[in-house]
């Protein structure tokens, strides 16, 4: 089944404790992206990647890192999480040139205490 | 930078009724999409309409696009309780590197 998977689905952590949210897709998509969703603010892009070893900032990249060492994986790294990063995070992927039609993962609900 | 704005923000209807939600956007587009999100879960792609299309159907969904008014509407006919969700329109940003979502319409269908 074609899908985007994220792990963990739920995470409660404390300020400053490094964490990684994994994202993997099995559709051989070149493009991958991370969004966060907050009440009243909608979905905002954090980082995106057009292909392996090619990443770029979205609208709200501060406090996040990403890497794209393999085509299928696009982990989101929070080196020193803070409470304002409490949010619902989505990973998405698409074929290159078809970024208007992205496939979304199930989401990761992160709470930073 | 927000591209789409849905209207209304919330909509409550009875099963069997039709639900209409609207989306306005700011810049020129190649296509527009509608997504559904069940409470706190992932986004599901519903339908894409291209800029040269005026109307598109998919099952109980009907989408219209008016590029002169920079607006789109999503009609769900014969609503069911399972249609209860938030609905978002989305367009690609100018660089084609991100989807820009509106804040969504929350639809509640009661039986």
Image (spheres, rainbow, N blue to C red):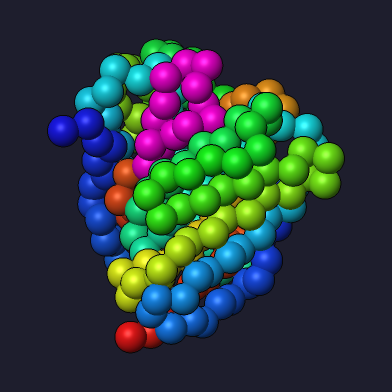
Q: Residue at x 78, y 32 (%)?
A: B28
Q: Position of residue A74 (x, y in %)?
A: 35, 30
* A11 lies left or right of B47: left
* B111 lies left or right of A37: left
- In the depicted view, which residue is nearer to us: B41 or A47? B41
* The residue positioned farthest toward the right in the image shown: B68
Q: Position of residue B52 (x, y in %)?
A: 68, 27
Q: Residue at x 54, y 59 (%)?
A: B75
- In the depicted view, which residue is nearer to us: A105 or B74? B74
> Which region is colored magenta?
A88-104
* A99 lies left or right of B85: right
- Is residue A58 shown to the viewer in this render? no
* The residue positioned farthest toward the left in the image shown: A1
The quadrant where residue A91 appears: top left
The quadrant where residue B83 appears: bottom left
* A7 lies left or right of A90: left
| Residue B60 part of the magenta segment | no
Could you tell me which quadrant the C terminus of chain B lies in? bottom left
Q: Position of residue A36 (x, y in %)?
A: 50, 52
| Residue A98 part of the magenta segment | yes
Q: Position of residue A4 (x, y in %)?
A: 28, 37
Q: Residue at x 41, y 55 (%)?
A: B60
Is B15 placed above or below A11 here?
below
């Amino acid at each position: 089944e074609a899908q985007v998977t994220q792990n963990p689905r739920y995470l409660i952590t404390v300020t400053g404790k490094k964490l990684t949210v994994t994202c993997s897709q099995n559709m051989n998509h070149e493009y991958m992206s991370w969004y966060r969703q907050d009440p009243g603010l909608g979905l905002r892009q954090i980082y995106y990647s057009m292909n392996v070893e090619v990443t770029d900032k979205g609208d709200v990249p501060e406090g996040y890192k990403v890497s794209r060492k393999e085509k299928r994986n696009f982990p989101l790294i929070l080196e020193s999480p803070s409470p304002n990063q409490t949010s619902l995070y989505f990973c998405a992927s698409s074929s290159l040139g078809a970024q208007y039609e992205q496939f979304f993962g199930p989401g990761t609900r992160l709470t930073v205490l | 930078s927000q591209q789409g704005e849905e209207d209304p923000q919330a909509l409550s209807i009875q099963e069997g009724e039709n639900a209409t939600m609207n989306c306005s956007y700011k810049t020129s587009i190649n296509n527009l999409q509608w997504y559904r999100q069940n409470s706190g879960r992932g986004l599901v792609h519903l339908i894409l309409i291209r800029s040269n299309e005026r109307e598109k159907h998919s099952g109980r969904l009907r989408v219209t696009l008016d590029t002169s008014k920079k607006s789109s509407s999503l009609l769900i006919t014969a609503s069911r309780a399972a249609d209860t969700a938030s609905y978002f329109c989305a367009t690609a940003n100018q660089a084609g590197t991100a989807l820009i979502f509106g804040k969504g319409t929350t639809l509640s269908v009661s039986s």
